[in-house]
């Protein structure tokens, strides 16, 4: 779908690499620019190994199908090489703090003077303006400052971080949406665009309806556990051997749920008959339902509610998710080839299909594997490549 599109990616860790992995999965040529010697930090996030080789789950997840070149951007000739590379690019993605790209001479205005068709995308911690614009941030900081962590966890207990890096991932998705829209718009206008997003803005976007709820009611929502603010029953319930989520999200489904629990009286109880009443009286509703759901194991309730056409699912552990028949049937788990090419690493495939095809991710690249090829195509000699693709530790960091 994006064959012929060249992406120059100087981002690192998760948000930017996730965005460029999606673009690579769609067929774009992604050139990952890494620091000589160390590369993307996630290369070092090793946990276990396969076939005797150390494996970084994060690097394997976010970087298959990309070319790797090394440039020390503290070194002016390396920055010049990056600028020259962007002249042949369609998309440029970075996650520097605001102001850093100007100091490096790789800001949007500078690069688009040389390549007006370039789509330029920056991902930051807190956005490009405001008192926190220059402040560093990561997923945990964004979850905390954006209000998400303040809602996670059980009432009266400490806040909990969502273990999935949702700020990073949503920022990556937002970057992809902006980039694809800009590429489409370029077909009409002939010129590129500048896209910016941040982890903070992305977390706030996920919190949208809760923010609107507060702004219209004046009531701030605290930690909810697994509860839903707007509909009940719609949360986790204990069973004899675990937990299930029951989500009877409208009145008709609630009546079926009450019958399935052999408690039809709950459906006509004036405290619970209509959705607004169930929300207003949710503490008592949940107490009564927990007394019932504890009587049988999770499998019983999943089968019972399925027969009644009530939404229900067990809360699965990660090993159960991996072994689940639904995951196997969908082909959501796939493999990428490790950097050495000797082993294959299991990863999650792209989460959508095109004409029924989920596609397969490309292999992982060794650090700097494509430096000579990519810079050679730009006209650099072997000696010049050696000089600009090595680390220069004596220079001050940007």
Image: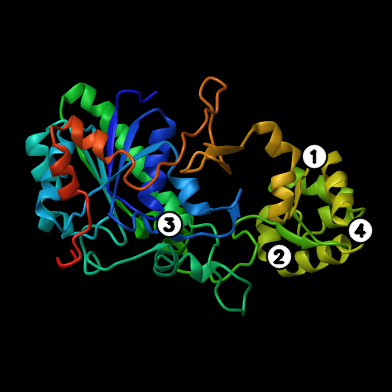
| Quadrant position of residue 358 | top right
The answer to whether residue 106 is seen in the rendering is: no
Position of 222 with respect to 193 (left or right) is: right
Q: Residue 68 placed where, x, y %?
A: 33, 42
Q: How far, Cα to Cα, is label 4 from label 1?
A: 19 Å
Numbered badge on residue 42: 3
Label 2: state its secondary structure.
helix
Label 4 belongs to which residue?
296
Numbered disc in front, either 2 or 4: 4
Mark 4 vs 1, N-terminal side: 4
Counting residues from the N terminus, which is met first, the one under dot 2 or under dot 4?
2
Tell which circle, 3 or 2, labels the residue nearer the N-terminal end.
3
Mark 1 against mark 3, which lies toward the viewer? 3
Which residue is the site of mark 1? 309
Q: Please report whichever mark, 2 or 1, sits nearer to the chain's N-terminal start.
A: 2
Residue pointed to by mark 2: 282
Give me the residue at 65% from left, 57% from top.
276
- Please identify the residue farthest to the top as the structure is shown: 355
């Amino acid at each position: 779908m994006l064959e012929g599109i060249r992406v120059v990616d100087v981002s690192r860790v998760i948000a930017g690499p996730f965005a460029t992995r999606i673009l690579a999965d769609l067929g774009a040529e992604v050139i990952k620019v890494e620091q000589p010697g160390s590369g993307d930090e996630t290369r070092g996030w090793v946990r276990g190994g396969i076939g005797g080789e150390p494996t970084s789950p994060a690097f394997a997840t976010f970087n298959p199908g990309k070319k790797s070149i090394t440039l020390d951007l503290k070194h002016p000739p390396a920055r010049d090489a990056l600028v020259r590379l962007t002249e042949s690019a369609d998309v440029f993605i970075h996650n520097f703090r605001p102001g850093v790209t100007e100091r490096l001479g790789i800001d949007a205005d500078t690069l688009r003077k040389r390549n007006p068709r370039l789509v330029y995308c920056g991902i930051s911690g807190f956005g490009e303006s405001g008192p926190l614009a220059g402040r560093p941030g990561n997923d945990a900081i964004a979850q905390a400052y954006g209000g998400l962590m303040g809602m996670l966890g059980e009432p009266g207990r400490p806040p909990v971080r969502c273990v999935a890096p949702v700020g990073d991932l949503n920022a990556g998705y937002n970057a992809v949406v902006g980039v694809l829209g800009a590429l489409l718009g370029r077909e009409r206008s002939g010129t590129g665009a500048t896209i910016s997003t941040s982890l903070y803005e992305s977390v706030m976007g996920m919190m949208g309806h809760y923010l609107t709820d507060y702004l219209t009611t004046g009531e701030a929502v605290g930690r909810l556990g697994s509860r839903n603010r707007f509909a009940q029953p719609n949360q986790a319930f204990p069973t004899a051997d675990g937990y299930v989520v029951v989500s009877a999200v409208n009145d008709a489904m609630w009546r079926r749920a009450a019958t399935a629990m052999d408690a039809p009286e709950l459906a006509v109880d004036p405290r619970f008959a209509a959705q607004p009443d169930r929300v207003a009286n949710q503490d008592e509703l949940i107490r009564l339902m927990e007394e019932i759901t504890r009587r049988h194991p999770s499998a019983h309730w999943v089968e019972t509610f399925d027969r009644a056409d009530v939404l229900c699912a067990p809360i699965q552990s990660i090993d159960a998710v991996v072994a689940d028949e639904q995951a196997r049937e969908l082909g959501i788990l796939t493999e990428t080839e490790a950097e050495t090419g000797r082993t294959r690493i299991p990863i999650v495939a792209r989460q959508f299909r095109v004409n029924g095809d989920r596609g397969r991710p490309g292999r992982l690249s060794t650090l700097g594997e494509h430096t000579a090829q990519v810079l050679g195509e730009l006209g650099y000699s072997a000696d010049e490549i050696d000089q600009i693709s090595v680390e220069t530790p004596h220079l001050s960091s940007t």
